Image (cartoon, coloured by chain):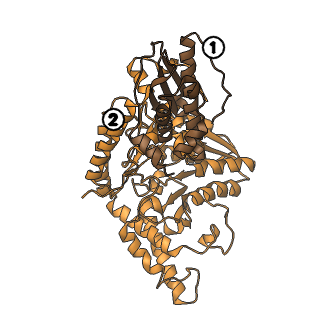
Chain colours: A brown, B orange
Amino acid sequence: MAYSDKVIDHYSNPKNVGTLDKSSKSVGTGLVGAPECGDVMRLQIEVDDTTGVIKDAKFKTFGCGSAIASSSLATEWLKGKSVDEAGKIDNMDIVEELNLPPVKIHCSVLAEDAIKAAINDYRKKNGLEEMTFDEKRVH
Amino acid sequence: MLKLPIYLDNNATTPVDPRVLETMLPYFTNHFGNAASRNHPFGWEAEEAVDYAREQVAQLVGCDAKEIIFTSGATEADNLALKGVFEMYASKGNHIITVTTEHKAVLDTCKHIEKLGGEVTYLDVEEDGLLDLSKLEAAIKPSTILIAVMYANNEIGVVQPVKEISAIAKKHGILFFTDATQAVGKIPVDVMKDGIDLMAFSAHKMYGPKGVGALYVRRKNPRVKVTAQIDGGGHERGMRSGTLNVPGIVGFGKACELCRLEMEENTKRITVLRNKLENELLQLEESYLNGNKEQRLPHVSNISFKYVEGEGLMMGFNKNIAVSSGSACTSASLEPSYVLKALGLGDDLAHSSLRFGLSRFTTEEEIDYTIQAVRETVLKLREMSPLWEMHKDGIDLTTVEWAHH
């Protein structure tokens, strides 16, 4: 299977690899997937407390090239968005942007799940009610 | 000069040796006859070429030429051996013993036989990939007609104790079949010394062409018979009908001859390169060799690089280096390698594995390039891996509650 140029680009030059201070109140962390399934994504957002805008986003991913590309792209999209806007990122947007083939759609779903988990971690830390999202089934 | 891409997936298939190709070419053009045409020189030429090739094949594995049945490849030979014995010896019993790490050509054929009323025992292997002989003997029943254990494994390269297995089979009056696709041409295989009754192998794993293989069927002590699975003109002593693939068979013969003459020298050279590759890569932290280190083929190495995923890893260099992975992502099933899982490896380590398969054409330069590329990619991906970070922070990953999806 050949990868799209965009997947190769994100894989070769991943954006925003790294770690934010998980204990900080302004950081939300989402860890999704499982080693047994062959992919684990950790996505973190740092929110500006006054504006509610995501000022930084970092990821680390164990997985195939598409999983790495999906999370790299997600961090790019998250920066500068408000938390509410971030919650609206849909996995199909990632599929479209990266030209993911059907067998790799689960990578994009994982990225969406990671975003939502990070948002909820942030909300929980700040005494806000967790958002409920429609369940997406993968695998 | 290093030529890219580098091919290190020789357990999947090997390139045709130029000397093999050269031998084959006239049989596409000038000598195109049907080996079954008995009444003119075109047929005689083809028949003569097939006879010669049959001798070359027989010589490599130490049998009589009459004991070689040409097929379209090892998968067909596996099918013929298993289904053919099951059918031929139905009055004697219906039980077959095999192992869980067999190639799908054996496992799926066994599944089919189960549907036909056969009973199949799938033995687990030990952590090193080898079969425990006491477990084999314990599985034998009065209805057992066949033991089917591969000679060498295609993913990890471990070589089963074939002589001991055949001795057990003989003691109990059971036939012994081995899929030796990965072994023939790479290590000395001798059906007499090894006590093999039926053996499947293929040309394209030993620098011959695709689309041709053989089933060895013993003719003496005991005389083994299989029921044909393809009916027709009664070729191959009635066991496999179908016009013979003359150029393919000629190439198969030549490939066998070259392997016989050059095996020792090739093995020496390839082992040095394989060991260099393996030792260098195992220097990386948290990298593990899969399968028994001693009892194995000289040209294979299967290594798990913990905390990085196999397909992601291959993507780092697969434009320049061809290897394969036990990762689920490389298969349609999303399941990691069943062979690695049979060794007791966790799914995470199975997902993190790469198989390197060297050939007689592999050079030291290619190995050096590969070592460097794999090492760099592993290090880069670990920097990107949340699991590596957790491991470095002293977190036991088995205690983490993962969001399984």
Nearest to the eye among marks 2 and 1: give it.
1
Q: Residue at x 53, y 69 (%)?
A: B66
Q: Residue at x 47, y 54 (%)?
A: B12
Side of B171 where B375 appears, left or right: left
Can you identify the residue that label 2 sits on? B282
B137 or B350, which lies in front? B350
- Could one spot residue B175 in this view of the protein? no
* Residue A12, horizontal then vertical, whole percent: 39, 42
Q: Are marks 2 and 1 in contact (CB under 8 Å)?
A: no
Side of B266 where A88 appears, left or right: right
**In the current view of this chain or complex, which residue is farthest to the bottom?**
B40
Same chain? Circles 2 and 1: no
Can you identify the residue that label 1 sits on? A129
Q: CA distance from mark 2 to mark 1?
A: 48 Å
- Could one spot residue B255 in this view of the protein? yes
Label 2 chain ID? B
B173 or B199, which lies in front? B199
A37 or A109, which lies in front? A109
Question: Which disc is residue B250 wearing?
Answer: none
B288 or B343, which lies in front? B288
10 Å neighbourhood of mark 1: few (<14), some, or many (≥20)? few
Side of B393 where A66 appears, left or right: right
